[in-house]
Image: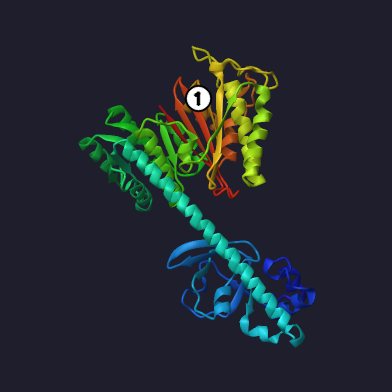
Amino acid sequence: MKLHPVEIAKEIKSFSFFKSFNEDLLLQAATMIQTESFAAQTGILQEGKKNSSLYFLRSGKVEVSLGGEIIATLDTPGEVFGEMSVITTNLTSTTIKALNAVECFVLKSEDFAHVHPKDKDHFQSLLYQIYCFILTERLMRTNEKARLFEILNRELHEAQSAIEKGGGGRVLLIEPDKKQQLPIRMALGGTGVQLDIATDAPSGRNFLAENKYDIVLCEETCAEVLKEVQDGKNAQFAVLLTSKDVQGNVRILERHRFVDHIISRDAEDKNATIRYVLTALGKLLNNDLFGVEKYLTWGVEVKTKAIVRSSQREELRDEVFAYFKKMGMRTTVLERVNTVLEEMLMNAIYDAPVDASGKSLFNHKSRKEEIILDTHQQSTLSFASDGVLLAVSVRDPFGSLTKDIIVDYLLSCYGGAAGSMNAEKGGAGRGLHQIIENADLTVFNVKKGVRTEVICLFNVDGQKKEAQPSFHYFFV
């Protein structure tokens, strides 16, 4: 259905491109604007082709690629593309493709000549001001991406160095998907680690029959091999590689409770997979599980605070909030941090402390009852950010968290029975669920009877990058 210029003017008024336009200019622009629809997976602009139109996204999502590499996706109404080829009259530098059904407003450069003479100079002046604004904004985004890329390179270098210091080692990867093999190949390149790759369970067993390994990494569909690895003692560590689906992972772990180490991967985020695999292997090969700094860029200052009493929780949360707020962190991120931190502090005070026989000391008490911890019972709160990730962690001196607690609590929460396991205790039994759901990544590090550390990582940009969060755990 064709829109009337008044309807178009009303809609584009909210687009950042047109915010400087007065009502008359908006209406003039609206008379020149056409609407176009694009089906999913169809091209809108083609790299190297001539273009004379400005496109304004109304609905749907488009993909921007350069030389075959995806560099961005756009899904915000009012996003503009095609402007560079209109400004410079050069051939288009990127390809724009509709990922789903897309609706656009289109303004052709030849129609600019139809602006009323009395408004023409003002109209063109506004256009060039807007172009300058767009170019400046795009340059800032490019600079930020370059900064984040440099940070990632430093992170990977440090993680690779940590593995090298451990003397390398020999790793077997059992992974049928060649696309998922690549990030691990890239992660271990140059580390001194010898990597063997099996594409299924039988070939994995053949490798294991012929060689001894420091670590076996196994994709979830071949998880039964990890049981054989542990029973046969032909590798020091067996690690399960899963997807980012928490509920799916919990179901997998329910069937494979023998697994001591789990790493989740995002099939669409190669850099994150490389980073987290390197970090995990470094931790295991160097027998050094603990420390929030392992997930942040080298050299970041980590703040620490002792957790002494239950009435201290609000004070600690306020201090962490103020520290990150001063760094310029978004309130949306800090609200999630605050939720996670409250649960972590409650756990450190009421749930973690146990006596010499492993019996809980305070878990039966009301969460309103004041608890003061002796020096040997106190946990440590740590927090830091490297500009890409924000991290908070709590480390206790008990090591009483078990795999069964994690799996059973999450099964009850995702199964609609939250709190049912804690009927005789002072808490509601939702803490682990709240922590995992609010963080982007949660890492559990446990040395039985010695220490437990829970690390929560948040993307600084404030966007939860996946519908489901994820978790890793390491038990030794």
Residue 194 is situated, as x and y percent measured from the top left of the image, at 27, 43
> Can you tell which quarter of the image residue 12 is in?
bottom right
* Nearer to the camera, 180 or 38: 180
Using residue 113 as the reference point, say whether residue 176 is left or right of it. left
Using residue 149 as the reference point, say whether residue 101 is left or right of it. right
In the depicted structure, whether residue 45 falls above or below residue 405: below
Residue 402 is situated, as x and y percent measured from the top left of the image, at 48, 25
The single residue placed furthest to the left in the displayed view is: 210
User: Which residue is at 45% across, 38% downward?
Assistant: 294
* Nearer to the camera, 75 or 117: 117
Quadrant into which the N terminus falls: bottom right
**From this viewpoint, is residue 268 visible?**
no
Residue 48 is situated, as x and y percent measured from the top left of the image, at 46, 76
User: Which residue is at 23% across, 40% downward?
Assistant: 206
Count the numbered circles shown.
1
**From this viewpoint, is residue 245 visible?**
yes
Quadrant into which the C terminus falls: top left
Secondary element under disc 1, as helix, strand or loop, is loop
User: Which residue is at 56% across, 36% downward?
Assistant: 383
Looking at the picture, which amino acid does disc 1 mark? Leu
In the depicted structure, whether residue 174 falls above or below residue 133: above
Residue 437 is situated, as x and y percent measured from the top left of the image, at 58, 39
Q: Which residue is mark 1?
A: 401
* Nearer to the camera, 356 or 224: 356
User: Which residue is at 72% across, 77% downward?
Assistant: 30
How many other residues sit within 10 Å of disc 1, few (<14), some (14-19) or many (≥20)?
A: many
